[in-house]
Image: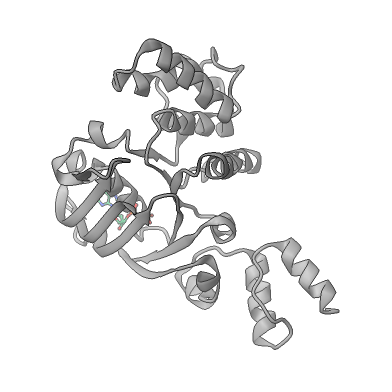
């Protein structure tokens, strides 16, 4: 079942000369991990903001088409007709910059904040705060002042605060782009855990495509406001030349295996250095 349907969505920001999204159509299926890649300015962030209704409710512009979110009981919410406060517990959004998302005095309060807005019982709030902080590896830091955390911890806190609301979908817009390699690993590790343990539906925009090509169920490739390709990671890997022409950063192993295959020296495309090395060894290369 689709948890989000995007139908012929076009959006132009106020005062912008061109549309940031042009006739975009796709579904997010319950339980899937959908990756979104594309060059800078192709509309990925705009699309994320449209998935939980910030566009067009808070950020206004010319909006045509429809975005529909479904809750666990199958009730439908058209984002144009539903307040963001009602949509955000269903579609949790995590942005690039963790500092822009944290505004409470302690780690614990940060997670409790969204839950208080859901008017949950205080005991239930306490349980969920602990649960979300344990999952994200932050239990023990609950009394810390969020700005004192490392980049990876801050972003894990932002994810914990959203995940504690038990959203239908977690939408993450380049959550690791401002983190060092360790922070990036921590955040992507947490996403893998949320998939593995809780089967949460994920929509992830990532500049580093290796994680998406290794773990996503399906990938959308965007350019100039349009979805120009949609397929499995294996199908997207076949589009290496297209990705390179768009300026999308692809894993070195994919690029090397693509070139070797073109020259008849390798049979398949490989995403990780480990896979490439083991294939080269077994083929005597
Ligand atoms: P991406 O996330 O792929 O980098 P964006 O969604 O940020 O792409 O941007 C898509 C297009 O919309 C770009 O041309 C960008 O300049 C424009 N844009 C983004 N935000 C705004 C805004 N607040 N006002 C006007 N134009 C915007």
**Image side of residue 264 versus residue 4, left or right:** right
Query: Which residue lies most toward the bottom here?
Result: 264
Query: Residue 210 or 68: which is nearer the viewer?
Result: 68
The residue sitting at 59% across, 17% down in the picture is: 141
- The N terminus lies in which quarter of the figure? bottom left
The way the protein has been coloured in the rendering is one colour
In the depicted structure, whether residue 179 falls above or below residue 207: above
Q: Residue at x 40, y 33 (%)?
A: 166
Residue 271, x across and y down, in percent:
64, 65
Q: Is 249 placed left or right of 270 in the picture?
A: left
Residue in the image at 63% along x and 77% along y: 258
Compared to residue 6, the image places residue 185 above or below, namely: above
Q: Quarter holding the C terminus?
A: bottom right
**In the rendering, at what x and y percent does residue 248 appear?**
50, 65
Q: Position of residue 284 (x, y in %)?
A: 86, 79
Residue 76 screen position, x and y as percent: 21, 45
Q: Tell me if I can see residue 43 in this picture.
A: no
Q: Looking at this view, is 251 or 274 the one in front?
A: 274
Q: Quadrant of residue 215?
A: bottom right
Q: Decide: is 272 above or below 133.
A: below
Q: Could you say which quadrant of the image residue 9 lies in?
A: bottom left
């Amino acid at each position: 079942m689709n948890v989000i349907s995007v139908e012929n969505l076009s959006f132009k920001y106020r005062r912008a000369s061109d549309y940031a999204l042009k006739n975009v159509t796709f579904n997010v299926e319950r339980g899937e991990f959908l990756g979104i890649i594309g060059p800078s300015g192709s509309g990925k962030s705009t699309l994320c903001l449209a998935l939980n209704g910030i566009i067009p409710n808070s950020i206004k512009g010319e909006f045509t088409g429809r975005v529909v979110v479904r809750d666990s009981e199958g009730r439908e919410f058209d984002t144009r007709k539903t307040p963001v406060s009602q949509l955000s517990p269903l579609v949790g959004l995590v942005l690039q910059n963790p500092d822009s998302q944290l505004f409470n005095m302690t780690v614990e309060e940060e997670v409790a904040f969204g839950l208080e807005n859901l008017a949950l019982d205080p005991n239930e709030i306490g349980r969920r705060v602990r649960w979300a902080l344990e999952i994200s590896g932050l239990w023990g830091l609950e009394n810390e002042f969020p700005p004192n955390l490392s980049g990876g911890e801050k972003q894990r806190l932002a994810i914990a605060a959203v995940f504690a609301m038990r959203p239908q979908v977690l939408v993450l817009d380049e959550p690791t782009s401002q983190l060092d390699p360790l922070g990036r690993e921590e955040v992507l590790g947490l996403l893998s855990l949320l998939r593995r343990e809780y089967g949460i539906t994920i929509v992830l925009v990532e500049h580093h495509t290796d994680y998406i090509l290794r773990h996503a169920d399906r990938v959308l490739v965007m350019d100039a406001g349009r979805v120009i390709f949609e397929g499995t990671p294996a199908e997207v890997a076949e589009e290496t030349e297209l990705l390179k022409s768009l300026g999308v950063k692809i894993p070195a192993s994919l690029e090397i295996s693509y070139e070797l295959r073109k020259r008849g020296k390798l049979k398949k495309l490989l995403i990780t250095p480990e896979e490439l090395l083991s294939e080269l060894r077994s083929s005597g290369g």
